[in-house]
Amino acid sequence: MSYGKELHVASLAVQRASILTKKVFHEKAKGTISKDDKSPVTIGDFGAQALIIQAIRHNFPQDEIVGEEEASSLRENKSLKDQIWALVKDARLEDSQAENDLGGPVENEEAMLRAIDAGNSAGGPKGRIWALDPIDGTKGFLRGGQYAVCLALIEDGDVKVGVLGCPNLPVDDSAPLSADVGEQGTDEEGRGVLFAAVLGQGATSRPLGRGALQPSQPIHMKQVTDITHATFCESVEAGHSSHGDQAAIAKKLGITNASVRMDSQAKYGSIARGAGDLYLRLPVRADYQEKIWDHAAGDLIVREAGGQVTDAEGKRLNFGKGRVLAENKGVVAAPEGVHAQVLDVVKEVLSKK
């Protein structure tokens, strides 16, 4: 199966949702409500989830969706619901054919709430399940740094299609990562990238547009011949990944380049196109379980760009165990040629804890 329609719909849906998130940022409509895992939720989170799920349900009505948000808080908070609906009802692509391909605008407020609530799949090893993170890296989004709109199709536990919208990354695939990439990037000219991959068909990037999809080009991980010259990408939040362990690993590998810290799956996209080399997400506590929507799209994009992605024990990430990566601890993403070398050092450092 070529997954051509799935790729097309997912790419357009992420592009349309990314436009909404940029509008939210510029209007500074940051009405946040508390959430169990303590990460902030914004109007953009709910609006982007509604837009993407509406497009999936229109095109693939039998598919299930694992989404991060649900609408119970909106049903009780009219002010927040009204703010989100004001954005969602006007969100559309500037190309009429592209908009029609998604099923057109969301019909009304109730349809918006139903779409948000449709992301309630439990996940699992069988069937077609979309994993959606409407804004990955919410704190990065709120401060004008890196965030991503993330969507992946998982079929029988295997990721088949992955799309990342990264509105604040440079369009230029060859632009090196600067130390301030996690802080500076709000919608200047030359920013906004759509990464995509289909299993067995390679990975691509294209500029994030406002209408029909822009032309794409293949992307590839940089071949690292000397690990000491590699650059790490790591999470901004110390609560997401252990910075101390990362520093110890870098030291053992002889890496002296400063790590580039940024939020979200923008890290996966960055290393997939060779702007960075290595991405580690190291366990901060024994009982923490990663969510599938935080990794599914990025995992496929890196592997299709010539990389290897495993957990900290060397196992492939298993997306067929429900809403979390129940069988995996941590993430090690690197070019295929040096992944084993990096993994050995990761195991050595973590074994001493």
Image (cartoon, grey):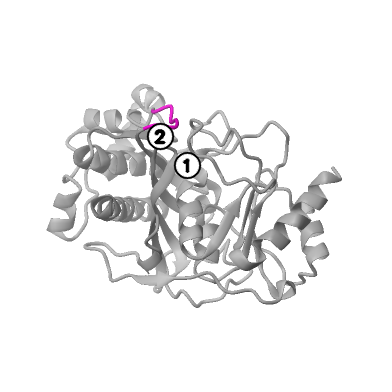
Q: Give the position of the C terminus as an image quadrant.
A: top right
* Tag 1 residue: 293
Q: How far across and down, in percent of the image, does residue 66 sit? A: 40, 34
Instruction: Name the one closer to the observer, 98 or 278.
Output: 278
Residue that badge 2 annotates = 66
Q: Give the overall secondary structure of the magenta segment.
A: loop
Identify the element where label 2 is drawn: strand
Residue located 82% across and 63% down the image: 252
| Image spot of residue 185 (x, y percent) | 49, 65
Residue 265's disc is none
Q: Are marks 1 and 2 in contact (CB under 8 Å)?
A: yes
Image location of residue 336, percent across then percent down: 59, 64
The residue tagged with tag 1: helix, strand or loop? helix
Q: Is residue 45 above or below residue 222?
A: above
User: Would you identify the image quadrant in which residue 279 lies?
Assistant: bottom right
Q: Is residue 146 visible?
A: no
Residue extending furthest right? Answer: 352
What x and y, as percent, mark residue 242?
73, 48
Name the residue type under label 2.
Val
**Left or right, 225 with reference to 186:** right
Residue at 40% across, 64% down: 202
Question: Badge 2, how many Cα within 10 Å: few under 14, some, many 20+?
Answer: many
Magenta residues span 121-126
Q: CA distance from mark 1 to mark 2?
A: 8 Å
